[in-house]
Image (cartoon, rainbow, N blue to C red):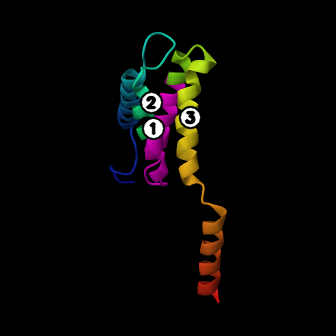
Amino acid sequence: SSIGTTPTKSHNKLYQDTMDGISWFLFYIVRGVPGRIHSKAILVIQVIFQSLLTITEENSILASLVSQFLYQLCDHIQNPTHFEPVWQALYQTMDKCIIPKEQQHQKLHSLKHILD
C-alpha cells in the first residue's frame, strides 16, 4: 500500500484533534452565560445548520463537526427551554430540505417524460 492511502496513528490523532478544535471553536462562539447560548448565537447556529444542506459523501466531515458541536452545546445548555432557539434553527433548515408536493409532482412528471 502507498503512504498516502493508509492513515497512520499520527494522522488519525491529527484528524481527531482538528475536529475537536474546530467543534470547540464553534461552541465557544455561541456559548453565553453558564447554561445558555449567547443572545446573537442563533445567527451562527443558523449558518452552521445551513452548511448541512450541502453535505455529500465526500464532505461528510462537516456533518461530524456539526454533530460534535451539538453534543457540546447540549452539555452546556442546562434548561431544555434554553435550547428552543436551536430547535427553531434546525426546523428552519429542515424546512428548506422539504420539497413541496407540487414540485415533487412536477419533478416526477419530468422524470417520467425522460424515461418514456
Residue that badge 1 annotates: 46
Q: Nearer the viewer, residue 74 or 83?
A: 83
Q: Residue at x 60, y 14 (%)?
A: 79
Disc 1 residue crowd, few under 14, some 14–19, many 20+, Cα 10 Å? some
Estimate the x, y position of residue 107 in percent, counting from the top left.
60, 73
Q: Secondary structure at mark 2?
A: helix
The rendered magenta stretch, by its main secondary structure, is classed as helix
Q: Amino acid at mark 1?
A: Gln
Q: Residue at x 49, y 30 (%)?
A: 68
Figure check: 112 above or below 47: below
Picture quarter with the N terminus: bottom left
Separation (CA) of disc 1 from disc 3 = 9 Å
The answer to whether the residue labelled 1 contacts the one labelled 2, judged by CB atoms less than 8 Å apart, is: yes
Q: Residue at x 58, y 13 (%)?
A: 78
Q: Which residues are magenta?
A: 49-72
Q: Amino acid at mark 3?
A: Gln
Q: Amino acid at mark 2?
A: Ile
Residue that badge 3 annotates: 88
